[in-house]
């Protein structure tokens, strides 16, 4: 029996990632959670993540139990480890959306069931799986494609780059000084990406790209930095003029929520190149594929 966790995209080999994507696209999901529960713990608020993951569990035949932050109070009412051990008594999988990534690592260290990262300050791997599904649905595959990310080199950007590199896509990331990947992250990305451009020039990143991606400049918990971040990201708004520098047929992605007029212009987000709603729907499909694969692994074989 093999117990696997999913805390970041590169927890999967490229071949395993292909298996997850295939399960995500399966027209008849395997009922691997029939009669079983899935703990969905939200230390951070959620819209897409809660809805998509709950529905993914239902489609796999399981029963999702959503747990709000105040119900467990990690490391206040109980330690992270004790919460994980308790939830593992009842559920086939523990999924958690947390502030600090190390809380997920602590859960995984003691849990007897798979632990899934629904978002942390370090990574957002289920979003990256949805992004791959969206790209494949748009272009039919990944060969010869380039994804360009414009904005903060944050958790979304890190997972996106790892995912795109895993399937052979070229990756370009444009971020201003002070918001670029550190040396350790860059080394990790270069180990996974055959072609990686890191720059402070949005136009250079977007030039010839098939996918242009952005995310909010001000994430949850960064509200005190809002004015400073808006100043620092001046010139990084993805608008139609920037999209015109991408390849013919390029599409725009955004993990949402979006702030129209900041990281993305309204006319771009709502325009014909935008694929944000198929991308949002794919959050459900990607969660379903990942959970089907992980529960299969925990049970001694994949479905």
Image: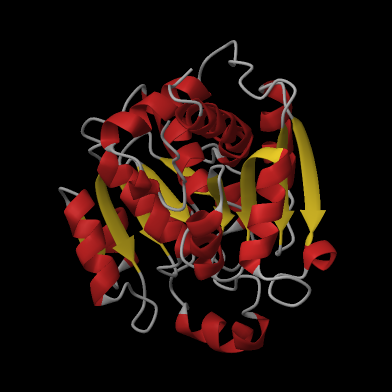
Residue farthest toward the top in the current orientation of the protein: 28
Residue 168 appears at what percent x and percent y? 22, 38
Q: Is residue 47 left or right of residue 181?
A: right
Compared with 276, 173 (above or below) is: below
Residue 273 appears at what percent x and percent y? 50, 39
Residue 203 appears at what percent x and percent y? 31, 62
Q: Is residue 127 left or right of residue 58?
A: left
Placement of the N terminus among the 4 image quadrants: top left
Residue visible at 63% across and 48% down in the picture = 95
- Choose between 159 and 59: the one closer to the eye: 59
Residue visible at 76% across and 37% down in the picture = 64
Q: For residue 39, what is the image quadrant? A: top right
In this rendering, does residue 17 appear at all? yes
Compared with 146, 196 (above or below) is: below
Compared with 35, 40 (above or below) is: below
Residue 151 appears at what percent x and percent y? 44, 67
């Amino acid at each position: 029996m093999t117990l696997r966790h999913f805390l970041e995209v590169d927890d999967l080999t490229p071949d395993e990632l292909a298996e997850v994507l295939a399960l995500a696209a399966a027209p008849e999901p395997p009922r691997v959670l029939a009669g079983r529960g899935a703990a969905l713990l939200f230390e951070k608020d959620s819209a897409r993540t809660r809805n998509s993951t709950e529905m993914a569990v239902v489609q796999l035949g399981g029963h999702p139990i959503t747990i709000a932050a105040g119900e467990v109070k990690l490391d206040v009412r109980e330690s992270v480890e004790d919460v994980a051990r308790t939830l593992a008594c009842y559920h086939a999988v523990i999924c958690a959306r947390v502030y600090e990534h190390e809380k997920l690592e602590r859960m995984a260290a003691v849990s007897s069931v798979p632990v899934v990262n629904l978002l942390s300050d370090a990574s957002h791997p289920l979003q990256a799986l949805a992004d791959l599904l969206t790209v494949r649905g748009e272009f039919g595959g990944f060969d010869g494609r380039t994804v360009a990310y414009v904005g903060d080199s944050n958790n979304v950007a890190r997972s996106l780059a790892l995912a795109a590199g895993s399937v052979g896509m070229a990756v370009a990331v444009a971020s201003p000084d002070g918001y670029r990947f550190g040396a350790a992250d860059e080394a990790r990305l270069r180990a996974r990406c055959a072609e990686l451009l890191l720059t402070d020039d949005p136009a250079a990143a977007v030039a010839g790209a098939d996918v242009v991606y952005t995310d909010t400049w001000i994430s949850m918990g960064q509200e005190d930095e809002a004015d400073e971040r808006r100043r620092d990201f001046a010139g990084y708004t993805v608008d139609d003029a920037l999209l015109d520098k991408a390849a013919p047929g390029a599409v725009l992605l955004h993990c949402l929520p979006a702030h129209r007029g900041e990281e993305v212009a309204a006319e771009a987000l709502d325009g014909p190149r935008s694929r944000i709603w198929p991308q949002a729907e794919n959050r459900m499909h990607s969660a379903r594929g990942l959970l089907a694969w992980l529960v299969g692994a925990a049970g001694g074989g994949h479905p």
